[in-house]
Image (cartoon, helix red, strand yellow):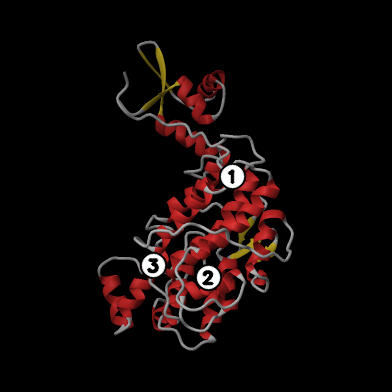
């Protein structure tokens, strides 16, 4: 027998009362099957009705209301303002804009942490720094917006300070402090500031959803950020800039041959296309234009050859890392530091919602007792 649901299970899946299920049967929307005097309903039929009820969108457990980020017409907006326009402001100010709606001057100062282990990757070091910073914050369970924002400022600065220096410190802005930990070349503060601003948030990306789920359980700041960082470790999300970097490195001797071999093997080309944008990734377009002010990019030959789609931010971050002698995982680090800003903004929104609202209902498809 195909997978079936009981009346109670079908009602939970559709978010209705059991009586409503029988009304659906009488209207011909569902088919009831009797087995040992128990009413059962086909999973596929129930799922189809659920999809229809929410406008045909599949895989969505809840429509999450947010005032933070809009993705529309191949553009990215924060609180109604075009993100590329906001690159003119320090990322610290943009962070406050996402958190509070106020675009104000701010200075993020780190706390002093004990020596962290040198083993592992730079992103390992970020995760350790978050955990240690949380353990050293006696007020971490104070979820008031004022305390949360102050703690977020300190945490982001602490994450950056926990990364090893590649040259002497130069500048006090977040972008300048991060640059000297990513590159030994002269500081390009505005370029890195733009990347941090453009990557700060991107609606309900998977890491952001994880952060919101943690916040719905009233987890504190450090747990929320740890939840987001855990998802960033996946090869389909935070690791993509590193995969794009490795591809650019392998393509240096002969970019077109490397691209052809990649396509011949049936693999996708990392750093191209997007699941939301249709014709361009506005963030990548902006960053690549800024990068070209420093000279031609090794990625340009590949971009011209890949005519069927467009470069995304993974490629832009990889190209930045290649151009300025950054380590292979620099894109992951920049992405993670920036996205903490968005996670904090979404957590602040989520704290104003009913707790534990992300309780998905399992659709049992195993053997029935």
Q: Which residue of the protein is positioned furthest toward the top in this rendering?
A: 37
x and y, in percent, of residue 195 in the image: 55, 70
Q: Quadrant of the C terminus?
A: top left
Of label 1 and label 3, which has the lower sequence position? 1
Q: Residues within 10 Å of mark 1 (few under 14, many from 20)?
A: some
Image point (47%, 78%), residue name:
167
Q: How many marks?
A: 3
Of label 1 and label 2, which has the lower sequence position? 1
Disc 1 designates what residue? 140
Q: Residues within 10 Å of mark 2 (few under 14, many from 20)?
A: many
Q: Which mark is residue 242?
A: 3
> Which of labels 1 and 3 is toward the front?
1
x and y, in percent, of residue 53 in the image: 56, 37
Secondary element at image label 1: loop
Image point (60%, 47%), residue name:
347
Q: CA distance from mark 1 to mark 3?
A: 32 Å
Cβ atoms under marks 1 and 2 closer than 8 Å: no
Q: For residue 105, which quarter of the picture?
A: bottom right
- Left or right of residue 278: residue 117: left
Q: CA distance from mark 1 to mark 2?
A: 25 Å
Of residue 306 and residue 159, the one placed in the foreground of this image is 159
Of residue 186 and residue 362, the one placed in the foreground of this image is 186
Q: Which mark is residue 178?
A: 2
In the picture shown, does residue 348 fall above or below 27? below
Q: Residues within 10 Å of mark 3 (few under 14, many from 20)?
A: many
Of residue 257 and residue 108, the one placed in the foreground of this image is 108
> Which of labels 1 and 2 is toward the front?
1
Of label 3 and label 2, which has the lower sequence position? 2
x and y, in percent, of residue 352 in the image: 67, 41
Q: Which residue of the protein is positioned furthest toward the front in this rendering?
A: 114
């Amino acid at each position: 027998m195909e997978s079936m649901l009981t009346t109670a299970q079908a009602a939970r899946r559709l978010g209705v009362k059991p009586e409503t299920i029988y009304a659906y049967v009488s209207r011909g929307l569902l088919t009831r099957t009797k087995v040992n005097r128990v009413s059962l309903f086909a999973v596929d039929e129930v799922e189809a009705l659920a999809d229809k009820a929410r406008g045909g969108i599949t895989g969505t457990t809840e429509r999450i209301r947010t005032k933070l980020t809009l993705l529309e017409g191949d553009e990215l907006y924060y609180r109604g303002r075009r993100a590329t326009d906001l690159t003119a402001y320090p990322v610290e100010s943009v962070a406050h804009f996402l958190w509070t709606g106020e675009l104000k001057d701010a200075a993020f100062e780190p706390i002093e942490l004990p020596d962290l282990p040198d083993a592992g990757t730079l992103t390992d070091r970020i995760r350790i720094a978050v955990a240690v910073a949380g353990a050293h914050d006696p007020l971490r369970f104070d979820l008031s917006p004022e305390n949360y924002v102050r703690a977020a400022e300190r945490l982001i600065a602490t994450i950056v300070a926990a990364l090893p220096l590649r040259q002497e410190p130069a500048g006090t802005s977040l972008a300048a402090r991060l640059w000297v930990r990513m590159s030994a070349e002269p500081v390009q503060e505005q370029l890195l500031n733009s990347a941090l601003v453009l990557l700060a948030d991107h609606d309900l990306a998977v890491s952001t959803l994880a952060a919101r789920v943690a916040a719905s359980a009233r987890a504190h700041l450090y747990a929320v950020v740890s939840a987001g960082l855990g998802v960033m470790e996946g090869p389909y999300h935070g690791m993509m800039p590193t995969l794009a970097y490795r591809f650019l490195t392998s393509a240096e001797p002969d970019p077109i041959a490397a691209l052809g071999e990649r396509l011949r093997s049936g693999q996708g080309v990392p750093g191209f296309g997007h699941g939301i944008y249709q014709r361009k990734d506005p963030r990548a377009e902006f960053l690549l234009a800024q990068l070209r002010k420093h000279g031609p990019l090794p990625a340009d030959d590949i971009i011209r050859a890949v005519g069927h789609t467009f470069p995304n931010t993974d490629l832009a971050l990889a190209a930045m890392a290649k151009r300025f002698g950054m380590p292979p995982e620099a894109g992951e680090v920049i992405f993670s530091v920036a996205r903490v800003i968005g996670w904090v903004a979404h957590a602040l929104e989520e704290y104003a919602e009913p707790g534990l609202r992300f309780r998905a209902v399992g659709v049992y498809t195993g053997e029935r007792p």
